Image: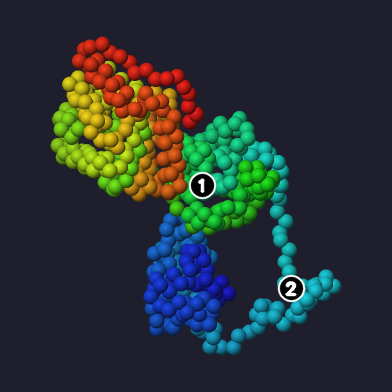
Amino acid sequence: MEDCLNFSECLNKLLSCANIKFSSLAKGINIDPSLVNRWIHGSRVPTYSSNYVELIAKYICSCINNSFQEKIIQDTLDLIISKQKCKKEMCIYEKMIFVLKEAQGCSIEMKRKPQPMTKTAEMKSIPRFSNFDSSNFEVFPDYFFSFPKVETKIITGNMEVHKSMIALIQAASQKEGKEEDPILITYNKITSTLPVNEDKAFLPIWDKATRDALNRGWNIVPLIRVDNNIDRMMKIIHDLMSFLAIGNYTPYYMNRYFMFSTGREMLVVPGIGAMITFPAVSPSQIECALYVEDKNVVKMFFRHFYYLLSMTQPLVRIYSPEESKVFLWKLIEYEERYGSRCHYAKDINSLTVPSNLYERYLKTVDKPLSELTEAINLHKRRLGAFISNVKDYKYKDICTIESIERLIHYLQYPSDNLSMLSECKPTKENIIEHIENIIFLLEKYKNYEMAIVNETQLHHDIKSIWIIDGKATAFTKTKSSGNMDNNSYKLIDQEIYISFNETTVVSTFKEYFMDLWDSISPINKEKKEVIAWLKTQIEHLKGREYKPFTTPEYTMDM
């Protein structure tokens, strides 16, 4: 053990690593807080006959929220346990029991015999001076230590700091990444995910360097400060969609906002270097940065970052193409809660397909009966939730003119892993029935509104968004190019689904949606105008004159 680590020191270390207050521990193991307080301050030690050690270990293990917090505790336990006694096959709970019992024994046995004077005790006997004089320095010769000299570099100037951060990411992209050593970076006071907000020329450079690093096998863990700045948060979400599609990108956010407000940024690239920045007067400007390459210092930054991550939560939940059914169940779970809804997509909303028509559609799909039956039942549940909500809550729906026109011209639904519509074989009559149902929904439910826009007006990194106010949740999907076709050896696009539960991020999505909705011309969203245009599409399908939907000429900044 580390110089016979006593029980007080051991318990303090473990509670600190797990971010647990002593009052929470007392409540968790059902004892008086004053007893835990005495353990922490060393005035009491649990007896050998008690089961407190097991209860403490069990409670601390139950409070581990993520792999980063677990790693910090594992590292702490490994540092405390001597190499001779540490068993590699021990789980974290067994290690914690071992460490606590050793510390318990150390404290109990040490109290039974006279204690030799320690250096701390010796220091207490050293005279203190109210006005420290350097002439008295020889009194403390054994207790003052100089820091080791480490090669460091001070980078000054906002632009130079930004260039250096990009250069550090580029250096990583020249090497193969290791799964256990991710690139760590904070996004704190900076108004965009790229720490270069004054020169757009750097944006594609940062984007390429990050992509190259991800493609070389690096994992990147960004720690993001979320706030109510819509422009900043949408820029972060834009980049998230782009990087999440590649893979190995795991964003976290600080769930204790007051602890992440220093304005400093940290970038750690294991085995290469680390940087910490210092802000100037303006929060968007960086005055200087400390850059280090010394392995021990980089490791120190790395461990500190992991300490921060122990107090965070994942910003997103990613569902792979294989998990599309899991995503659908989660979407349905939230759709069945009461609250307003917003839906934004390039393609027509599958909820506008009536239940009986959907059943007829699936009869044309070559799938096992059990799979088709499940799909029909899920669609009915979604429709039931939609009808139940739209009676009392607003539902705004945005889709593109092109998606409806393609449906009319080619009688084919777009690819959608959630509804199987792309695999069905609709007739002209089926499409007419579908469009008539959309008109019915618009006329029957005053809370249901539909806007039809050009594809150029949509955010191309985000294919669909479901925003559910019932419990402040946003679901979205984007395209991934991470899988290789075994026949052509080319990267193929696949849809990945993502959920956001952090309320500020969900509010950002909603604000973005409402900004888009408000910018749409009345002719594209007023019910009578949308219904009139949908009727022209029905007339076209019946063989009469086709009237294309005309929209005002205007541009939008996305």
Task: Tell me: 508 left or right of 361.
Answer: right
Q: Quadrant of residue 299?
A: bottom right
Task: Tell me: 283 left or right of 244.
Answer: right
Look at the numbered discs 1 and 2 and tell me whether their residues touch, using CB distance below 8 Å: no
Q: Which mark is residue 28?
A: none
In the depicted structure, whether residue 2 falls above or below residue 332: below
Disc 1 residue type (three-letter): Asp
Q: Quadrant of residue 353?
A: top left
Q: Which residue is mark 1?
A: 227
Disc 2 residue type (three-letter): Asp
Q: Position of residue 218 (x, y in %)?
A: 50, 42
Q: Position of residue 373 (x, y in %)?
A: 16, 39
Instruction: Give the SS element for disc 1.
Output: loop
* Mark 1 → mark 2, Cα distance in angstroms: 49 Å
In the depicted structure, whether residue 225 falls above or below residue 456: below
Can residue 460 be seen here? The reply is no
Q: Residue furthest top?
A: 545
Q: How is the image coloured?
A: rainbow
Task: Tell me: 393 left or right of 455.
Answer: left
Can residue 285 be seen here? The reply is yes
Viewer-nearest residue: 466 or 410: 466
Q: Which residue is mark 2?
A: 142
Q: Of the two numbered discs 1 and 2 on the same chain, state the one appearing first in sequence.
A: 2
Q: Residue at x 50, y 53 (%)?
A: 254
Comparing marks 1 and 2, which lies closer to the viewer? 1
Q: Residue at x 61, y 50 (%)?
A: 264
| Mark 1: few/some/many CA within 10 Å (<14, 14-19, 20+) | some
Viewer-nearest residue: 205 or 98: 205
Q: Position of residue 329 (x, y in %)?
A: 27, 45
